[in-house]
Image: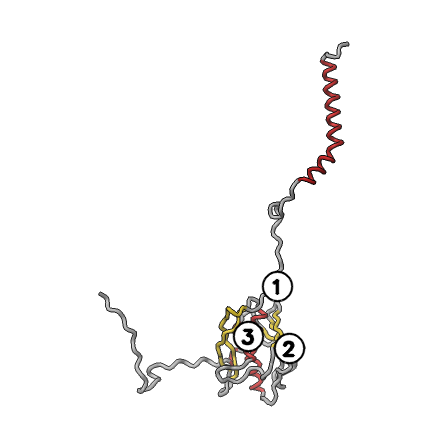
Amino acid sequence: MSRDTPGWRNARAVVGLLVLFSGVVFTSPRWSALFRATAPTAPEDEAGAGPVATPTPDAPADASRSIQVRLLFPAADRNALLIEERAVAYDADLARQLEQVVTALATGSRAGHLPALPPGTRVLQVLVDERGTAFVDLSKDAAWTGIGALEERLAVYALVDTLSLNFPAVRRVQWLVEDKPVETMAGHVDLSRPLRADMTLIAEPEPSPTPDDAGPGAPAAVASPTESPR
């Protein structure tokens, strides 16, 4: 029987395919390992992975930026709280911003009003919870002696109303001294629970004098010159 017949040719083709298939099967692990060793690794951003956020430390108050706040101090001549505007350093963190304001309040009035906090009081920390309660932790110097109930009430709400007036997110204020709750500052006002603002204690701003109120000796207002149309 001739080996050049179509049957023999088909048989040789089948045997050749079987040999080729066996070689691929037995050598494929070596080829795949070689490809893995030589193929370049794609960067994370090219491989589809997003950038990894790097934690940054809390930024301190920005001394180059400031905000205007309204501080409240007890009046020296009446039973009310008076507004005194002050610029304080800006801080994006609410708790640290409140600490800036309470510190400004503790430094005292620049307009001759009574102090809201006893001299020497330091602000240790301010925290705000999710309910809008600001916990103001003061040093042990925050204790009045020898003042009456009305004076203590004005001093307490000078702080409470200042925070509530400037920051709507603050709904209540809890006093702490050396990280502990206190019962009172001077024996009259209960500080064992958070206090809401009492805006009725704030005095209305006095109206600016008008020319009629200034009297006959006051200089008349001079109108600004205007250019005549040509």
Place of residue 76 in the rendered image (x, y in percent of width and height, measured from the top left): 50, 87
**Residue located at (31% from left, 79% from top):** 221
Badge 2 crowding class, 10 Å Cα cut-off, few under 14, some 14 to 19, many 20 or more, is many
* Rendering coords of residue 65 (x, y %): 50, 68
The disc at residue 57 is 1
* Front residue (pair 217, 88): 88
The amino acid type of the residue labelled 1 equals: Pro
Tell me the residue that label 3 is attached to. 101
Instruction: Estimate the spatial distance between the alpha carbons at disc 3 and disc 2, rounded to whole Å.
Output: 16 Å
Q: Residues within 10 Å of mark 3 (few under 14, many from 20)?
A: many
Toward the bottom, the furthest residue is 146
The residue positioned 31% from the left and 87% from the top of the image is 217
Name the secondary structure under disc 3.
Answer: helix
Q: Position of residue 163 (x, y in %)?
A: 55, 74
Coloring scheme used: secondary structure
Q: Amino acid at mark 2?
A: Leu
Closest to the camera, between mark 1 and mark 2, is: 1
Q: Residue furthest left?
A: 230
Question: Mark 3 belongs to which amino acid?
Answer: Val
Which comes sooner in the sequence, label 1 or label 3? 1
Q: Which quadrant holds residue 126?
A: bottom right
Q: In the figure, 33 relative to 162: above or below?
A: above
Crowding near the residue tagged with mark 1, few <14, some 14–19, many ≥20 C-alpha atoms within 10 Å? few
Distance from the alpha carbon under mark 1 to that under mark 3:
22 Å
Look at discs 3 and 2 and give the one toward the viewer. Answer: 3
Residue tagged by mark 2?
176
